[in-house]
Image (cartoon, rainbow, N blue to C red):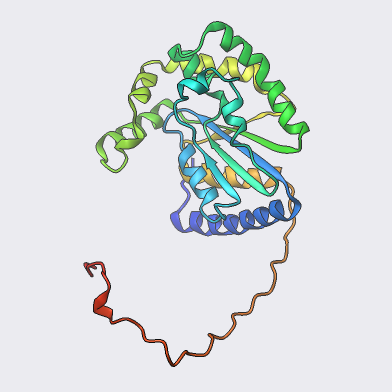
Amino acid sequence: MTKLKKAEYEDELARLNLELVKLQDWVKAQGLRVVVLFEGRDAAGKGGIIKRIAEPLNPRICRIAALGTPTERERTQWYFQRYVAHLPAAGEIVLFDRSWYNRAGVERVMGFCTEEEYQDFLVAAPEFERLLIRSGITLVKYWFSVSDDEQEKRFQERMHDRTKRWKISPMDLEARRRWFDYSKAKDVMFAHTDVDDSPWWVVDADNKRKARLNCISHLLSLVPYEDVDPPVLELPPRGPADPDYQRPPVDSQRWIPQRY
């Protein structure tokens, strides 16, 4: 696999960023609702692509939903209920950093749900997603696939880089021990939920730069949009000075140290 040079990657990312902004403006103008799910192996690069998509966009329009461990109350709710609360309103995009598919992955493998709950999910998930689609939501599901060797390399980087250590949780370490259990769970999940109405799109994530560009480009191809001409803005002149206004002395304010 040929490497993508940093300059080439940055140039193409800048071009795609502009297209993402056009998509955002179209979603807002048309009152669309877009949901994108990101699932996959630990260290597959989900966080990186979510960051690159959200970075050039207005956070009031494009939100990231990364739900933590359910509370005691949430555990007694309908399983999909806490995810429904994060769905978009008109003119919004929501990026789910992991989603309701936790039940088919970590909950299944780690024994956090019963066999009955798991089997019910496999039947209910496609129906739930059809309901979202019928309501007018555009739903896109991505699975980030990473090879054993590449995942091992990224785990080692995280273990030895203090700034990345937070990315490894005790659950991640346990998941590493259960690699093949997760593989089997993923295969069963795909067999039940990779349907024509809401298919899984698999991203080859061994090369982070290519994975990001390929995923953004694919997302743009799935959500038809047009370039909405933004209104022409003119910067007005600053208002006239008030002769009675006196700025406070500079030394009357608490300035941070100039260390750089």
Pinpoint residue 191: horizontal percent, then vertical percent. Answer: 64, 16
Regarding residue 205, the answer to whether it shows in the image is: yes
Figure check: 150 above or below 187: below
Q: Quadrant of residue 175?
A: top left
Pinpoint residue 24: horizontal percent, then vertical percent. Answer: 65, 53
Pinpoint residue 243: horizontal percent, then vertical percent. Answer: 44, 93
Regarding residue 2, the answer to whether it shows in the image is: no
Observer-nearest residue: 131 or 227?
A: 131
> Residue, x 57% and y 20% (percent of image)?
77
> Residue, x 74% and y 27% (percent of image)?
131
Quadrant (top left, top right, bottom left, bottom right) of the C terminus: bottom left
Residue lying furthest right: 134
> Residue, x 63% and y 12% (percent of image)?
120
Residue lying furthest front: 244
Q: Quadrant of residue 89?
A: top right
Residue lying furthest top: 115
Figure check: 179 above or below 200: above
Q: Is residue 77 left or right of residue 152?
A: right
Q: Quadrant of residue 123?
A: top right
> Residue, x 25% and y 76% (percent of image)?
252
Figure check: 180 above or below 81: above
Q: Is residue 67 left or right of residue 234?
A: left
